Amino acid sequence: MRYNFCTLFDRNFLYKGLALHRSLLRVRPNFALWILCLDDETYRTLSALQLDRVTLISLAEFEDPALKAVKPARNAAEYCWTCSPSLPLYLLKTNPILEQITYLDADLYFYADPEPVYRAFADRSILIIPHRFSPELARLEKTSGTYNVGMLVFRNDRNGLACLEWWRQQCLDWCFDFYDNGRLGDQLYLDDWPNRFAGVHVLENLGAGLAPWNVSQYALTKKNNAVQVNGTPLVFYHFHALDSYTNLTFQPHKLLYNITRRTRRLIYRPYLKELKAIIIEIKKKQPQFSAGLKPKPSLLDRARYRLNRDVHLPLKRAVPGYNRLYQQLKKMLRRNS
C-alpha cells in the first residue's frame, strides 16, 4: 500500500524537512510526499535537489483568496499553522483518486515503518494522536490541547472532508500564537473532534507521537538495533524546539523538558547526525542558502545551558525545596556583585 504524506515549511525549516524526507525513504519505500514551500527560496532550493518521491507545491498555485485575505495579519508561524488544514484538503480535492492523506509536521523523524499506525487506523476516517504529557507537564494540556497536530490522517470520505473543511474555517477565522479562551494556533481545535465528527480514531500506539513533552515517563530500550518505547517499536519522534547553529552545533530541546542522556543517545544522536550531514550537503550544493541556522552561541551561553540541564534541573526534580534555595542563592549573589 502506498502512503500519501504532506508537509509544509519555509526556508528556516528546510533542513528538518529534508531530514523527515530521508527518514521516510529509509523506513518506507512506497510513499508519496507533497511539500508546500512557504517561500520562493524553499521552492528553488528543493527543486534543484530533485527529491525522490516528492511533489513540490508553490504558494502561487496553493493560495486561494481566503488564505491571501488573512495572511497580512499573521506572522510566519501563524500563517504556517493557518495553512495546516488547507494543505491536506487541497490535495484531496485536486487528487480525488487519493484514498487518504497524512499531514506531517516538518520536524518529525521516522525510526520505523508507520504501518502499525495505519493498521490501527483501519477503516476509520480521521486519526489523531494525544500529547500524552508527562505528569510533571500535565498542566500544559489546558493551553496546548489534548491532541497534537504533528501527524494526522484524513480519509477521502464524507467525515474526513467535513473535518478538514471545518478545521480550515476555524483557522481562517482565528489562528494566532497565543492562548485565547480555548484556542491556540491550529491545535486546540482538535480537542473536540472525537465528539464533533464520526469515524475518529485516537491512536494508542506509544511509539507514534513520542516527543520532548512525554518521553520522560517511558522506558527506552534497544532491541535488534531498533529503539523501543515501553516495549513498543519507536515509529517517529517529534523534535520540537530544536535549534541549529552556524557552527554545526545544536540545542536539542528546551530546558522545560526532562531529556535524559539515554534519550539523547538513542533518539537525538541519530537525528542530529542526519541534520549535520544535510546542512553540510546543502552548503556545498547551494552555497547561497543561509537560512535555518542561528548565530553561534557564546561559550558562556553554552556553559549556562549545560549547567542548568545537567546540574540544576536534575536537582530541582530530585530534591524538595532545591529550587527555592537556588533562587535565594542567586539573589544573594546578585546583591553582592
Image (tube, rainbow, N blue to C red):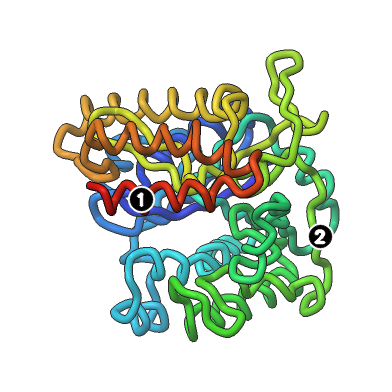
Indicate the amino acid at tag 2. Answer: His
Check the image and name the residue furthest to the left. Answer: 288
Reading the chain from its start, which is encountered first: label 1 or label 2?
2
Residue sitting at x 52%, y 42%: 239
Q: Position of residue 261 (x, y in %)?
A: 57, 26
Above or below residue 162? Residue 12 is above
The circle drawn on residue 247 is none
Q: Quarter-wise, where is residue 27 in the image?
A: top right
Residue 210 visible to an observer of this rendering: no
Q: Position of residue 268 (x, y in %)?
A: 53, 29
Kindly identify which residue carries mark 1: 332
- Label 1, label 2: how far apart the Cα atoms are: 54 Å
Nearer the observer, 16 or 124: 16
Q: Residues within 10 Å of mark 2 (few under 14, many from 20)?
A: some
Check the image and name the residue furthest to the top. Answer: 224
Q: Residues within 10 Å of mark 1 (few under 14, many from 20)?
A: few
Q: Is residue 56 left or right of residue 47?
A: right
Nearer the observer, 337 or 267: 337
Indicate the amino acid at tag 1. Answer: Met
Q: Position of residue 228 (x, y in %)?
A: 74, 28
Above or below residue 101? Residue 48 is above
Kindly identify which residue carries mark 2: 201
Residue sitting at x 53%, y 41%: 313
Q: Position of residue 225 (x, y in %)?
A: 69, 15
Quadrant (top left, top right, bottom left, bottom right) of the N terminus: top right
Q: Secondary structure at mark 1?
A: helix
Q: Secondary structure at mark 2?
A: strand
Residue sitting at x 32%, y 33%: 302
Q: Quarter-wise, where is residue 113 in the image?
A: top right
